[in-house]
Image (cartoon, grey):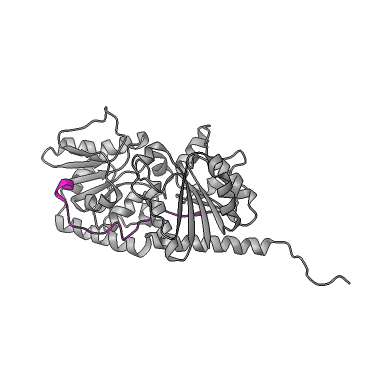
Amino acid sequence: MKLVIFGLTISSSWGNGHATLWRGLCKGLARLGVRIVFFEHDQPWYANSRDWISMPGGELVLYDTWRSIACRAEAELLDADAAIVTSYCPDAICAQQAAFAAARPICVFYDLDTPVTLTRLHNGERVPYIGDDGLERFDLVLSYAGGAALDQLRSVLRAPRARTLYGHVDPDVHRPVRPQPQYAADLSWLGTYARDRRTGVEQLFVKPARRERARKFLMGGSQYPDDFPWTPNIYFVRHVAPQDHAAFFCSSRLTLNVTRAAMAQMGWCPSGRLFEAAACGATLLSDSWAGLDEFYEPGSQVLVAGGSQDAVDALDADDAELRRIGRAARERTLDEHTCHHRARLLMQLLHDCASTQRADAPFVSTAPRA
């Protein structure tokens, strides 16, 4: 099988959650014998922080303008089995038009930001990666979120076939490693700054830091504003490269997961960081959202905090109990949430879609006319 993907980025993990997800998924697909061509608009902020250039089982095509690769994209689509266009792809509309014009591939839209997409639409905002006809022309729509998100993709954006393809983790990259002193902390938080996540980070990270002055808190990420309420016991690392995530997670007693407001409100939308930390055997402290218990069991595989006091209580827990919870989360992750699980699911969804298309195709008799 050959897949052509038009995405935001796979080459740089700076300031976005798409790159590591695509790296793992492409790796899983390559192991299944899939050839991939990934088109990425070469943005300067990603070019300056590029931390991945190898495409196992395929090719990464970096380009300056859509016009410069329009012919190349059309050529790649001619023999593609499926074309995938993602949310926040800078040239999503042009890519969609090219995919629709090609006769062969299954046309797929993968929204890795479903709650954000739907919230913007409800607020009357323009969503640049959604065309005027919504998603009705796509054969398959994949959603990073489940639950009510699938119903809204069908009703609001007229997706004819909507299915979940949740986040995941590459267990070869995120695994237990030796703790590193530069990442040692009682509570760590790794995430890009997002305005709609700030309240949660302040409640579950900053307020506990103010109350627990003798404890060390470590934050890793990018784009944090100057007015962020730092405290003397919060230490900051501007950017943690993917190859250092495991050491970051494994070096603290607890690591925090805070979900963006739109994702938490909609539910059934686990972040990639949740799976990454769990795969490392780190003990997770997460905010609460509908559907969390479908991925990890609260209390035995993840600790759940509704406010700052819950975070402080978690910090007071016994070390042996915290390690047990971390091990249980890792086992669950390896059983259900790796990039290889998602790659197999994607292949099955594409197969089902192709089978349905063949079944719906009009019958053309090859018998000779009388």
| Residue 83 place in picture, x, y as percent | 55, 53
Classified by dominant secondary structure, the portion drawn in magenta counts as loop
Magenta stretch encompasses residue 370: no
Is residue 53 visible in the rendered structure shown here? Answer: yes
Please determine whether, in this image, residue 124 is positioned above or below residue 301: above
Q: Seen from this angle, which residue lies furthest top?
A: 227
In the image, taking residue 369 as reference, residue 231 lies left or right, namely: left
Quadrant (top left/top right/bottom left/bottom right) for the C terminus: bottom right
| Residue 355 place in picture, x, y as percent | 61, 64
The quadrant where residue 361 appears: bottom right
Measuring 50% from the left and 32% from the top, which residue is drawn there? 123
Closest to the observer, 126 or 97: 97
In the image, taking residue 326 as reference, residue 101 lies left or right, namely: right
Magenta stretch encompasses residue 178: yes
In the image, taking residue 287 as reference, residue 150 lies left or right, namely: right
The residue segment tinted magenta is 161-185
The quadrant where residue 131 appears: top right
Q: Seen from this angle, which residue lies furthest left?
A: 214
Closest to the observer, 68 or 188: 68
Measuring 51% from the left and 50% from the top, which residue is drawn there? 150
Number of callouts: 0
Closest to the observer, 245 or 310: 245
Measuring 28% from the left and 40% from the top, which residue is drawn there? 221
In the image, taking residue 209 as reference, residue 196 lies left or right, namely: right
Measuring 53% from the left and 33% from the top, which residue is drawn there? 126
| Residue 8 place in picture, x, y as percent | 45, 44
